[in-house]
Amino acid sequence: MRVKDAIFGAFLLLLGLVVLVHVQGFSRIPGQQVGPGLCPGIIAAGMAVCGVVLMVLGYRRRETEPWGETAAWMRSGRHLLAFAAVVIGVAAYVLLAERVGFLIVAPILMLIWLTVLGVRRVPAVVVAVVATLLIWYAFYKLLRVPVPLGVL
């Protein structure tokens, strides 16, 4: 679906302003010149500026553009299935990762997503397993980010 730039710009502006207000409440780190809200604040300010630019451009093209139109992929059952699989898969990961574990949930989800997107089974299995192990290694071992182990 294509939404008029002015509408998307207003959404970006609103989101950027909400984040800017929210990061003001982040606690300061003693002895530091910058706090934890600096990077999110910069990104939020950039989103707000981009939102204003999109609103101005959308307003200038208000006579030549429809307010919204359905994209061709939204009329394709295969594409809608892939979109639904990704959305449902992300929700399933959020619900299951802590209880079941990353090393079990992630390859299953990747295998489902790759299959729905049209990848043949053998390459899909290999990619799902190898990608899961690489992601786990990068986060758990290199970055020392706790990855949910679940039943493991």
Image (cartoon, helix red, strand yellow):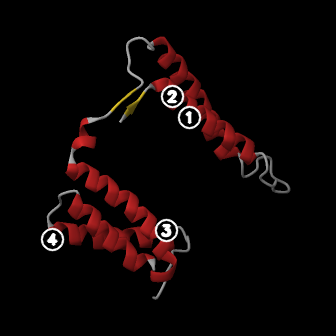
Disc 1 to disc 4, C-alpha distance: 42 Å
Q: What is the number of callouts on the image?
A: 4
The amino acid marked with disc number 4 is Val
Quick one: label 3, few (<14), some, or many (20+) residues within 10 Å? Answer: few
Residue at left offset 58%, top offset 24%: 52
How far apart marks 1 and 2 lie (CA) works out to 6 Å
Q: Are marks 1 and 3 in contact (CB under 8 Å)?
A: no
Q: Which residue is mark 3?
A: 94
| Mark closest to the chain's N terminus, 3 or 2 | 2
For discs 3 and 4, the disc positioned in front in the rendered view: 3
Q: CA distance from mark 3 to mark 2?
A: 30 Å
Residue marked by disc 4: 122
Q: Secondary structure at mark 2?
A: helix
Identity of the residue drawn at 27% across and 67% down: 112
Read off the residue under disc 2: 7
Pick whichever, 105 or 129, lies toward us.
105
Tell me the distance, in whole angstroms, between the alpha carbons under discs 3 and 4: 27 Å
Element carrying mark 4: helix
